Amino acid sequence: MNIIKENALFIADSHYPHHGEAFLELLQKLDDGSIQTPQLFLMGDNFDLLFGHNDFIQTFSQEAIALIQKLSQNIEIHYFEGNHDFCLKELFPDIKVYSRAQQPVYFDLDNKKVALSHGDKYETGFLYDIYCKLLRNKTTLKILKPFEKPIITHRLQKLSHKHICFTFDKFEQRVEAILKHYSDVDMVIEGHFHQARVIGEYISLPSLACQGKVGLIEEGELVFKQL
Ligand SMILES: [Mn+2]
C-alpha cells in the first residue's frame, strides 16, 4: 500500500487565484526550501478553476502550474482532483493524479488504513454524478472549445465573488452518511467542506483559503498548522 510519510503536507481548497495568494506563496516556499516536505498531497480545489484540454484556462494560474510542475521533479506529489480542478493528468505528467472516479485512494499512516479523497465522491446526489462525468469528458471539453473564452470568463467572474467559507450546518450528520460508504478503514481524510474538524475517524481538512491552514504529519498524526 502507499505510505503517508512523516512531515507529509496536505493542502486543500486554496481556490487560487480568487481567494488569496496563500497557495502560490506556499509553493514558492517549497521551491526555495524555506518549507520542506518529502511528500505533498494536493487534495483538490487548490485552483478555483483549472482543467486540462484547455490552454486558455491555464493562463490564469500559469505561475502556480509551473511551480507545481517544477516541484514534481523533486518531491513526491499526489493530486486528488476536486470539483474545481480536474482532467489534470496531461498537465502534471510527473504527479500521481487521481480523478474523482479513482477516489478514494488508500494509504497507510502509522499502520492505520486511511482513505483519501477530495470529498465530493459520496452523498452528492445522482445529478451531480452525471454533471461530473459530463464535465470531465474530453469530448465535452472539445465541443465547448469555441465558446471557451466567454464561458470561462463568466465562470471566473462568478467564482471570484462566491463566498466559500462558512460553517457547515449539521456537519456531523453529513459525516455519518459519508462514513457509511466505508467499512474497512481506520480513518477518512477529505477536503471539500472547508471545516477543519476531526469527527471520530473523519478528518475534514482546513481550507487554505478559509482557515489559512494545512495538514501536516507529525509523529504519525495529522495536525492542522499555519505555515
Ligand atoms: Mn470541492
Image (spheres, rainbow, N blue to C red):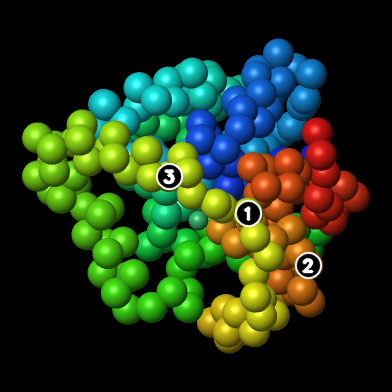
| Residue farthest to the front, as pictured | 161
Question: Label 2: how many residues lie within 10 Å, few (<14), some (14-19) or many (20+)?
Answer: few
Taking the image as drawn, is residue 185 in sight? no
Label annotation for residue 165: 1
Nearest to viewer (mark 3 / mark 2): 3
Question: Label 1: how many residues lie within 10 Å, few (<14), some (14-19) or many (20+)?
Answer: few
Q: Secondary structure at mark 1?
A: loop
Mark 2 and mark 1 in contact (Cβ < 8 Å)? no
Q: CA distance from mark 1 to mark 2?
A: 17 Å
As drawn, is 48 to the left or to the right of 75?
left
Tag 3: amino acid? Leu
Q: Position of residue 176 (x, y in %)?
A: 64, 84
N-terminal-most mark, 3 or 1: 3
Question: Label 3: how many residues lie within 10 Å, few (<14), some (14-19) or many (20+)?
Answer: some
Q: CA distance from mark 3 to mark 1?
A: 13 Å
Tag 2 residue? 198
Tag 3 residue? 159
Q: Residue at x 82, y 44 (%)?
A: 225
As drawn, is 158 to the left or to the right of 45?
left
Q: Secondary structure at mark 2?
A: strand
Location of residue 5 (image quadrant): top right
| Residue farthest to the top, as pictured | 32
Mark 2 and mark 3 in contact (Cβ < 8 Å)? no
Location of residue 151 (image quadrant): top left
As drawn, is 97 to the left or to the right of 40?
left
Q: Position of residue 77 (x, y in %)?
A: 57, 37
N-terminal-most mark, 3 or 2: 3
N-terminal-most mark, 1 or 2: 1
